[in-house]
Structure formats: C-alpha cells, structure tokens
Image (tube, helix red, strand yellow):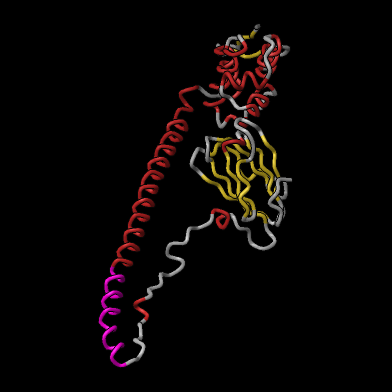
Amino acid sequence: MTTGTTSTGSTEPLANEPSIGQVLGNARVAAGLTVDEVSAETRVRVPIVHGIEADDFSRCGGDFYARGHVRALARAVGVDGDELVCRYDAAHGGAPQDAKVPLLENVGERRISAERRRPNWTAAMVAAIVVVIAVIGFNLAQSGPKATTASAGSPSSAASGATPSIGPVLHPTLPPASSAPVKPSAIAAAPAGKVTVKLLAQNGDSWMMVKDGTGKVIFEGDLAQGQTQTFTDAKELKFVLGNAGGVHVWANGKDLGTAGGDGQVVNVTYTPGDPVAG
C-alpha cells in the first residue's frame, strides 16, 4: 500500500489510493470471505462491517471503538491493521489514548448497572418470602379461633335449639390484589390510539435500532442481557434486532415471545392495536 508523507511527518493516503473501507472490502473479497463470516470471527456486528467498508464509522460508537474494529477486520482479512489505523487517525485527528476515557466510563456504567440489578433481585425475593410467611401466619392465626368458637357454641345451640351465628372472622378473606401476580402483558399495554412495545434481553445481549412513525432513529445500541426497553409512538415503531433469539417482545399488551432465532437479524414493525409483526 503506497502512502504519502507530509512536511509534519504524518502519514496520509495518496489521492488515488483506496480508502480504508475499500482496502478492507477488497481484501475480504480476495480472501473469499463473506461479511457474515468476518462478523462471526471478529464479533463486529454485520451493520458495522458494512458501514466501515463504506467508510462510514458513525456506527462504531466513537474513535476508540472504530480503531479497534479496523484492527480486528484487518487481521481477519490479512492486511496491515496498524497502517489503516494510522490513516484513520490522520483523517479524524485523534490518538488512541485520547479515546480511552469513554471506554472506562462505559465499563463503569455497566458495572454500576449490574450492581444495581443484583440487589433488586434480592429485594424482590425477600419481599416474596415475607408475603408468603405473612399469608401462612394469617391463616394459622385464624384457624385457632375458628375451632374454639365452633366447639363452644355447640352445647348452647343443642340446648336452645337455635342455630349458632358464626361471625365474619371465621371466614377471613384476603385482599385479592395482595397475592395476584402482575401479568407481563400488562406492562406493555398501550394507551388508546398508540403503539407500545417492550423488549427484554432475556437470552443474551442484542444490538438494536428503533425508528418512530416519522422514520427518526430514537434508539440505537446494545441491550444487555436482563435489561428492558419500552417504546411508545402514535403511528408505528420499526425495529432492527441483531440477535432476535435473545429478545422477548410484548406489543400492545400481547406477549409475542422471542423475535426470532439465535443470532438472526430481524426487521419488525408494530402499529396501534396490531400486536403482529408487520
């Protein structure tokens, strides 16, 4: 690969030299590899591979990640990744050390998120145990007076011929909402005239992109396993799911199950009152 050197010593591509994306795309084709194969080997998502080969680095999430993706793709197709990264730095004006802060912040956010999730599960389990113990204790406490009252009232009833009255305490009734489980479909119920979709990364992480009824991208990124996202729009919601088998879907109050197979990229659209993928 031929490069030119400026007076400051930086390495820049010649005017007729292929771009970074062209170098990677041509090398992949020459190696007989498909985009899916390169994505599987490098763990760089298919949309990002397509974007880089078209010299569009906007999906990479920043310069630091873009450099990492370029190196990974270069290694997979057999070209010099360091040279391509140097060309990327010359074109985008940055050094690898300048972009380390976002990575550390991202790791910190995920760590804090994970730490917050764990106590929530523990608190939910403790609350459930307390409810069960309270119900059992209530029933046991009521069973004693019930038996005593019945036995004490029997002689007087037999002597007088009257039917003993049994107070309401002998038939305690628990509030129906205290132990009724919350249905998952109720969480994704949509207001009238709108579409509401809830996504849960149930079986693994998944990249996803969401567009509203105007075609505007309202979310693009990773949904880590255990996380949920809920979206509402007056017209429609369009989704691109990078790992459909890992995502559980509720649309307009209906449980639709997983969106597809493991690793499958799926495009789905939902409209008001229509829980079926369009």
Up the image or down, 174 lies above or below 187; here it is below
Q: Which residues are magenta?
A: 141-160
- Give the main secondary structure of the magenta stretch: helix
Q: Residue furthest bottom?
A: 160
Q: Is residue 16 above or below residue 215?
A: above
Q: Position of residue 145 (x, y in %)?
A: 27, 75
Q: Residue at x 41, y 40 (%)?
A: 114
Towards the viewer: 201 or 32: 201
On the image, the x and y values in percent for residue 176 come to 46, 68
Rendered residue at 57%/35% (across/down): 206
Does the magenta portion include 26? no
Q: Residue at x 28, y 91 (%)?
A: 159
Q: Is residue 278 left or right of residue 152?
A: right
> What percent of the width, then of the height, locates residue 39?
61, 22
Give yes or no for residue 149 being in the magenta stretch.
yes
Give x and y (percent) for residue 62. Answer: 55, 30
| x 54%, y 40%: residue | 201
Q: Where on the picture, by quarter, is residue 15?
A: top right
